[in-house]
Image (cartoon, grey):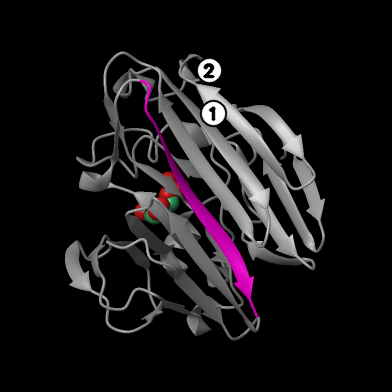
Amino acid sequence: MTTFTPRTLEHGADRVTAYDHGAHVAEWTRDGVPVVWVSKESRYEFGTAIRGGVPLVWPWFGNGPEGDLEPAHGLLRTASWSLAKEWESGWVWTIDQEATKSQPGIETFPYRYEAQLEVEVRDGLNIALTVRNTDDVPFSHEAALHTYLHVGDIRNTSVSGLDGVHYFDKVLGTNQTQQGPLLVSQETDRIYQSAADVSVVDPDLGRTINVSATEGSHTVVWNPWETKARDMKDMGDDEWTQMVCIETARLGDKKFTLSPGQSATMATTISLQR
Ligand code: TA6
């Protein structure tokens, strides 16, 4: 059931679909082939995040640093944003504290803020989240651009750019160090302590997707694998084979801290290399 009106942008071979709900880029195709993945079972309803695309995670990641915050991934991905600007290759949305005063979880972030999301198709897809502190006191926030990428088959895909990087394995609950390229061969939920460029090498689709972060501190890699995907109502049973999340993030002790009047931008660029 679709309850939101999509916005569509066609620019050369690129087609991007987005929603004011969450300022959520849901799809990006080039020459009709998806680069950004969205679930066929995604719900498009108020109070729910779209499963796929680029959900905005803010002001906390997951359930927050102590694991006690709700809802998961914060306030913005289920909020109604306002479109501020539209041109042939992009959009800008804005939102502020007043517009999110009824969002679940707002009581744990009682600060005045303004946020802006800029999306532009240039050489790839550029997504930049800017937050400004409009309060009289400082505040801190985590952020992630929770990008779902489309792959031919995750079991044949490798992720490079993380060799030697320390990570927290959320599935095992342990700290590890990446050795060589990452081959996703089981449920994977990892927080890497690096925001260097990452490449998703996809032999089935004959392409490589590059993810490049600006002002990130971490990269999160997630695939729910078979069992967890089956339990997710908004993901088809086999759809986990065709996605991987590569998320540009600013987390934990690297979170942003803004003084009154200060702003910070974190961005991700997704591009195709053939
Ligand atoms: O970024 C990875 C992660 O935090 C995973 O732990 C996983 O649960 C995923 O995000 C999806 O979260 P969601 O709240 O959208 O179901």
Would residue 41 be found to the left or right of residue 212 on screen?
right
Magenta segment's dominant SS is strand
The crowd level at tag 1 (other Cα within 10 Å; few <14, some 14-19, many 20+) is many
Question: Mark 2 is on which residue type?
Answer: Ala
Circle nearer the N terminus (1, 2)? 1
Q: Secondary structure at mark 1?
A: loop
User: In the image, residue 152 lies at what x, y percent?
Assistant: 61, 77
User: In the image, residue 70 lies at what x, y percent?
Assistant: 34, 33
- Residue at (68% x, 43% y) in the render: 18
User: Can residue 53 be spotted in the picture?
Assistant: no
- Residue at (34% x, 18% y) in the render: 111
Quarter of the figure that contains the C terminus: bottom right
Q: Which residue is mark 2?
A: 99
Q: Is mark 1 in CB contact (under 8 Å) with mark 2?
A: yes
User: In the image, residue 139 lies at what x, y percent?
Assistant: 28, 26
Q: Which residue is mark 1?
A: 79
Magenta stretch bounds: 261-274
Q: Residue furthest front?
A: 261
Magenta span contains residue 184: no
